[in-house]
Amino acid sequence: IVSGVRTSIPFRGRGLGTILEKYRIALAKHQNLHGLLCTVDVTNNQELKILHKTGWTPIYEFVNPKTTHTVAVFKNVVA
């Protein structure tokens, strides 16, 4: 489980989030996992961009009853 990953503001826009996401996917592959799930607030445009660039597919959306935020669920099939 990975939760609450953030890139500090001065380091944003340099591809670090994409590099870290690719690393997490490589770790999952190394652990012989076949798929991953991820949730993200639909207003988090930076994370959505990273997910799309690294092969994640949206599969579901729901409204968090506690926060009333819309949350997207993504899957990534580890090859």
Image: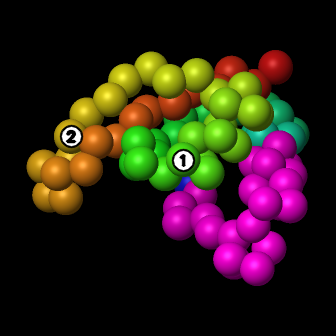
Q: Picture coordinates of residue 8 (x, y %)? A: 69, 78
Q: Which amino acid, by three-letter code, is at mark 2?
A: Val
Q: Is residue 35 visible?
A: no
Instruction: Return the disc, 1 or 2, that comes first in the chain's sequence.
Output: 1
| Neighbours of disc 1 within 10 Å: few (<14), some (14-19), many (20+) | few
x, y (%) of residue 50?
A: 69, 43
Question: Residue at the location (82% across, 20% down)?
Answer: 79
Say which residue appears at 61% left-offset and 51% top-offset: 46
The foreground one among 50 and 36 is: 50
What residue is disc 2 on?
63
Residue 57 place in picture, x, y as percent: 58, 22
Q: Read off the magenta span.
A: 2-24
Give percent across and percent down for residue 11. 80, 73
Give the residue drawn at x 68%, y 21%: 77
Please give the residue where the numbered disc 1 appears in the rendered image.
45
Closest to the observer: 48 or 21?
A: 48
